[in-house]
Image: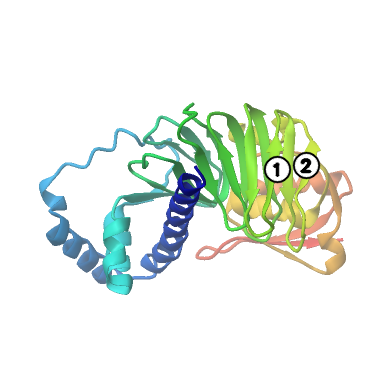
C-alpha cells in the first residue's frame, strides 16, 4: 500500500518537474531569432515526422482575443539540445500565453475548461497520464475541472499546488504578488510542499500566501470579487495603489511608476472596468481624491503612468 502511494507521489513530482522545466525552456525559446526557430522546427519535423501528420487541436478553443500557443516542437528541440534524452519525454506538451491586455480560453484534453487572465501562461500535456492531470500556471486562471475521482487534477505553481477531482476555482499566482486560491464550487486541497502543509478549502473560502510569508492563510471571501475579472470587472476594497498598478499594467499593457514610496501605499476603493480606457479610470480616481498622476504617451514604447500622492 505504502509502496503504491510512494510511486504515485514520485510520478506526480516527476510530472511537475517536467512542467517547471518546460517553463524555463519556453522562456529560452522566445529569445531565439527567426532563423533559429525555423531551424528548431525543421529539426523536429525530421525527427518526429510531424509534417506527415495532421495535428488534432479539437481540445483547444481560443477566444477572439489573441493568444500565443507554442506547440511541443520548439520546446522539445530545446530540451533535446540541452538535456539529451530528456526531450523525448517532453515532446507532448503545449503552452498557451495570454499577453498583457488580453485573455484566452482553453479546453484541456479531459474536457476541463480554463480562462487565462492577462499576462498569464498555462503549460499542459496534450494527453494526461493514467494517474494524474497536472498543469502548470503562471499568472491567473479560472478553472472548471471535469470530474474524475480516480485521477486528481493538479495545478502546479512555484509556491504551492492546488489539487482537486472536479470543481470550480480561481487561482492567482503572479510573480511578486500574493498567491490566492478562491473556491467557488466543490473541494480543493492546497499542497504547500516546502512547508509540508496541506490546506482544505470549502466553497466561499480562500487560501492566501504572501511573498516573504511562512504561512498559508485561510479566510472567508465573496467569490465574485475574485472571479468578475472574466467579465472585465475588478473590485478593490482598501487595496494599495501598488497592487492596483499591477492590474493596470496587465490589463492595459502600460508601465506604472511611483513618484515616491508613499504613493505606492495609497488606499484605493472602487471598481475597474476593462471596457473603459486607462485614462478614464485614472481620471475617476483623481476626481475622488485618491491619487494624482501624469501620463506620457509613446509611439514606439509603452505608455508610462506616474502616480503621485
Would you say 296 lies left or right of 85 here?
A: right
Extreme bottom residue here?
82
| Label pair 1/2, CB-CB below 8 angstroms | yes
Q: Nearer the viewer, residue 260 or 77?
A: 77
**What residue sits right under mark 1 in the picture?**
199
Q: Which residue lies at the image location 16% right of the left edge and 41% below the top edge?
A: 54
* Mark sitting on residue 16: none
Q: Nearer the viewer, residue 203 or 25?
A: 203
Q: Which residue lies at the image location 36% right of the left edge and 49% below the top edge?
A: 94
Residue 143 position (above or below residue 180): above
Would you say 199 lies left or right of 266 here?
A: left
Q: Would residue 275 be visible to someone looking at this image? A: no
**What residue sits right under mark 2 in the picture?**
218
Secondary structure beneath dot 1 equals strand
Residue 80 position (above or below residue 193): below
Q: Position of residue 13 (x, y in %)?
A: 48, 55
Q: Position of residue 274 (x, y in %)?
A: 63, 39
* Disc nearest the viewer among 1 and 2: 1
Extreme left residue here?
52
Q: Earlier in the sequence, mark 1 or mark 2?
A: 1
Query: How far is mark 1 from mark 2, CA to CA?
Result: 8 Å
Q: Which residue lies at the image location 53% right of the left edge and 65% below the top edge?
A: 301
Q: Which residue lies at the image location 49% right of the left edge and 51% below the top edge?
A: 6
Give the class, few, some or many, for how many residues have Cα within 10 Å of label 1's Cα (few <14, many ≥20): some
Q: Position of residue 258 (x, y in %)?
A: 77, 65
Secondary structure beneath dot 2 equals strand
Amino acid at each position: 500500500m505504502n509502496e503504491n502511494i510512494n510511486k504515485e507521489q514520485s510520478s506526480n513530482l516527476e510530472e511537475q518537474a517536467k512542467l517547471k522545466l518546460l517553463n524555463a525552456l519556453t522562456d529560452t525559446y522566445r529569445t531565439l531569432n527567426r532563423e533559429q526557430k525555423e531551424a528548431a522546427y525543421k529539426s523536429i519535423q525530421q525527427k518526429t515526422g510531424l509534417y506527415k501528420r495532421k495535428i488534432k487541436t479539437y481540445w483547444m478553443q481560443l477566444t477572439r482575443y489573441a493568444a500565443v500557443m507554442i506547440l511541443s516542437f520548439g520546446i522539445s528541440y530545446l530540451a533535446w539540445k540541452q538535456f539529451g534524452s530528456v526531450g523525448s519525454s517532453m515532446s507532448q506538451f503545449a503552452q498557451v500565453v495570454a499577453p498583457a491586455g488580453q485573455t484566452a480560453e482553453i479546453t484541456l484534453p479531459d474536457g476541463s475548461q480554463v480562462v487565462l487572465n492577462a499576462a498569464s501562461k498555462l503549460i499542459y500535456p496534450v494527453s494526461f497520464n493514467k494517474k494524474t492531470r497536472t498543469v502548470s500556471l503562471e499568472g491567473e486562471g479560472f478553472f472548471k475541472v471535469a470530474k474524475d475521482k480516480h485521477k486528481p487534477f493538479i495545478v502546479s505553481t512555484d509556491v504551492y499546488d492546488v489539487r482537486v477531482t472536479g470543481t470550480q476555482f480561481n487561482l492567482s499566482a503572479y510573480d511578486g504578488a500574493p498567491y490566492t486560491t478562491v473556491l467557488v464550487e466543490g473541494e480543493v486541497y492546497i499542497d504547500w510542499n516546502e512547508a509540508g502543509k496541506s490546506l482544505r478549502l470549502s466553497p466561499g473560502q480562500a487560501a492566501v500566501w504572501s511573498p516573504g510569508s511562512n504561512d498559508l492563510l485561510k479566510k472567508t471571501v465573496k467569490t465574485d470579487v475574485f472571479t468578475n475579472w472574466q467579465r472585465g470587472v475588478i473590485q478593490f476594497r482598501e487595496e494599495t495603489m501598488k497592487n492596483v498598478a499591477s492590474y493596470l499594467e496587465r490589463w492595459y499593457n502600460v508601465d506604472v511608476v511611483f513618484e515616491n514610496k508613499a504613493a505606492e501605499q495609497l488606499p484605493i476603493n472602487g471598481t475597474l472596468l476593462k471596457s473603459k480606457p486607462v485614462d478614464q479610470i485614472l481620471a475617476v480616481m483623481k476626481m475622488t481624491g485618491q491619487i494624482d498622476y501624469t501620463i506620457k504617451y509613446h509611439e514606439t514604447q509603452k505608455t508610462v503612468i506616474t502616480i503621485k500622492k
